[in-house]
Image (cartoon, rainbow, N blue to C red):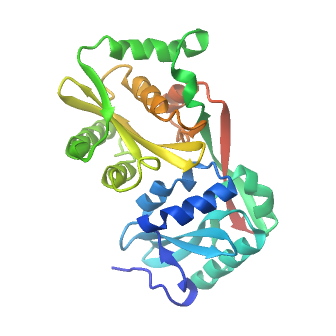
């Protein structure tokens, strides 16, 4: 198994771990980041022993985040997130470190917040759009009156008409039932789309829940009778800005995906905004998220060396 040896070009880096939370959050708050990829539990979920690791470094008051991964049986290093707070000199040193490790000039900046694009470009990085992410105001969904929220209201009503629907906070006692739901979801997704979909992030969310502060990672589960039919997780990217991290539900229950997203957003009302990520180019997910009337679309970029 190939694992990162933190020497040479990787000297003074460390693998991201739970005990990095406070210093990481301080850097992201100082940088005013809002991108979904800056969510700390997501970074932890990227660690896969022998395959990839998120590596951290503090440089001149900025947090640098690297991705070490094995590709074609060879390890390589990229700058995973533009430094927070953004600093051109820090980014240039990070790129130089990654180039030294790779032995060429192939290192990329894989995730860049829109506000940092000009500064990243100043480091001689060619920037291109990667994805757009949906930004919601969670306090908007208490009252679903009016034409704008008709689709949500109609789908929520389908669930509210079912008998014995319960929404409750996630606890570790729900972990096994969540894994069973994920297994069913994987099978259904395979039958419908020919792929297994994104399940590794869900597995990580279940494993991490209960091991980080609730403000950073908390969850909800939905039962119909005694059957767990949905789970969702989210928490703070930084004060005032949350991430809707991961959610899965039984897609055979009409209206449940709308009911679930609304319920999660209502549970995040301590935050002014919630980043719900992209729609991954899927028509159904695009329709769902558009029906929630995003207040903004946040663009995430990727950078390559010129």
Q: In the rendered image of this protein, does residue 273 appear above or below residue 30?
A: above
Residue in the picture at 46% in, 50% down: 216
Left/right placement of residue 87 relative to residue 20 reads right
Image position of 295 (left or right of 87): left
**Residue at the outermost left position:** 226
Look at the image and tell me whether residue 17 can be seen: no
Above or below, comparing residue 276 to residue 108 in the picture: above
| Quadrant where the image shows the N terminus | bottom left
Q: Is residue 285 left or right of residue 199?
A: right
The percent coordinates of residue 299 (x first, y second) are 67, 45
Please tell me whether residue 290 is drawn above or below residue 2 in the rendered image: above
Picture coordinates of residue 94, whole percent (x, y): 66, 75
Looking at the image, can residue 79 be seen?
A: yes
Q: Position of residue 122 (x, y in %)?
A: 82, 66
Front residue of 268/74: it is 268
Residue at 45% from the left image edge and 30% from the top image edge: 261
Taking 137 as reference, is 267 left or right?
left
Percent across and percent down for residue 298 are: 66, 42
Residue situated furthest bottom in the rendering: 8
The front one of 173 and 118 is 173
Image mark count:
0
Q: Looking at the image, which residue is at 53% across and 79% down?
A: 13
Q: In the rendered view of the protein, which quadrant contains the C terminus?
A: bottom right
């Amino acid at each position: 198994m190939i694992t990162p040896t933190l020497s040479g070009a990787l000297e003074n880096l460390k693998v991201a771990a739970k005990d990095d939370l406070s210093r990481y959050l301080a850097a992201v708050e100082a940088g005013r980041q809002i991108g979904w990829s800056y969510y700390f539990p997501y970074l932890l979920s990227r660690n896969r022993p022998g395959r990839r690791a998120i590596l951290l470094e503090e440089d001149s008051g900025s947090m640098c985040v690297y991705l070490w991964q094995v590709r074609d049986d060879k390890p390589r290093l990229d700058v995973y997130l533009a430094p927070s707070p953004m600093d051109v000199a820090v980014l240039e040193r990070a790129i130089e470190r990654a180039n030294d490790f790779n032995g060429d000039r192939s290192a990329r900046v894989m995730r860049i917040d829109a506000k940092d694009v000009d500064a990243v470009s100043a480091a001689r990085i060619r920037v291109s759009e990667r994805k757009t992410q949906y930004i919601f105001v969670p306090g908007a969904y208490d009252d679903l009156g009016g034409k704008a929220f008709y689709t949500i209201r109609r789908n929520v009503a389908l669930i509210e008409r079912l008998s014995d629907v319960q929404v409750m906070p996630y606890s570790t006692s729900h972990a096994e039932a969540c894994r069973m739901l994920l297994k069913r979801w994987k099978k259904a997704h395979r039958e419908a789309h020919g792929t297994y979909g994104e399940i590794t992030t869900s597995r990580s969310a279940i494993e991490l829940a209960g091991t980080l502060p609730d403000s950073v990672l908390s969850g909800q589960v939905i039962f119909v009778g005694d059957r767990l039919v949905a789970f969702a997780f989210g928490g703070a990217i930084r004060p005032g800005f949350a991430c809707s991290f991961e959610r899965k539900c039984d897609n055979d229950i009409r209206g449940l995906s709308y009911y679930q997203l609304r319920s999660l957003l209502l549970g995040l009302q301590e935050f002014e905004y919630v980043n719900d990520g992209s729609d991954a180019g899927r028509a159904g997910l695009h329709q769902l998220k558009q029906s929630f009337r995003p207040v903004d679309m946040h663009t995430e970029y990727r950078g390559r060396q010129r």
